[in-house]
Amino acid sequence: MMEYDDLVKRMEKLLPGKGEEKTRFEVPKVKGRIQGKKTMIINLKAIADFLDRDEKLLLKFLLKELGTKAIKESTHYVLTGKFSAQLINEKIDKFVNEFVKCRECKKPDTKMTKHDRINSIKCMACGAKYPIRI
């Protein structure tokens, strides 16, 4: 007859291990590099497309949060100043919380609309609708 501890150890071996829990909404990390006193962001359009938001809105938010200016060069943006990828990703997460995720259910299934100069977000998951300031 097996002891309780032996049975528990045997069960743990048979069960699949705990893997990383992935969510269906994982914002792509920013890709770029620092050159001298400037920061290049290569994949801002891809991030904006993933979030289903206008690239200009995301850029405007980042520039305001970072307190800098930027110019567009063919496929990427050049920001004045040195900014780490971690800092830019934190600002993008803040953007997601303010302009993408629903305030009620916290799901990312939202659409941004504009009606009579009033911007609003409508959640496709729970039906909530609320105005936002850009």
Image (cartoon, rainbow, N blue to C red):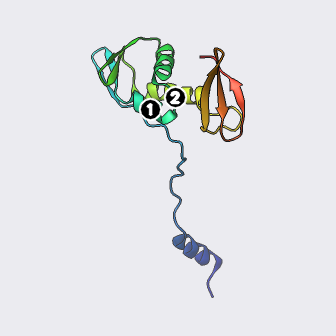
**Which mark identifies residue 88?**
none
Which image quarter holds the C terminus? top right
Instruction: Check disc 2: other Cα within 10 Å, few if <14, some if 14-19, many if 20+.
Output: some
Residue 76: image x %, image y %?
33, 24
Identify the residue at image location x=50%, y=27%: 92
> Considering only order in the chain, which callout, 2 or 1, is on the residue closer to the N terminus?
1
Residue 6: image x %, image y %?
58, 77
Going by the numbered disc 1, the residue's amino acid type is Ile
Residue 124: image x %, image y %?
65, 39
Going by the numbered disc 2, the residue's amino acid type is Arg
Instruction: Check disc 1: other Cα within 10 Å, few if <14, some if 14-19, many if 20+.
Output: some
Q: CB atoms at circles 1 and 2 under 8 Å apart?
A: no
Q: Please, is residue 69 above or below residue 101 in the view?
A: above
Q: Quadrant of residue 40?
A: top left
Q: Please, is residue 5 above or below residue 64 in the view?
A: below
Which image quarter holds the N terminus? bottom right
- Alpha carbon of mark 1 to alpha carbon of mark 2: how far? 9 Å
Identify the residue at image location x=71%, y=37%: 127
- Classify residue 61 as left or right of residue 78: right
Identify the residue at image location x=61%, y=84%: 2
Identify the residue at image location x=71%, y=40%: 126
Q: Residue furthest left?
A: 36
Q: Residue furthest bottom?
A: 1
Q: Which residue is mark 1?
A: 47
Q: Which residue is mark 2?
A: 53
Mark 1 or 2, closer to the camera: 2
Q: Quadrant of residue 86?
A: top left
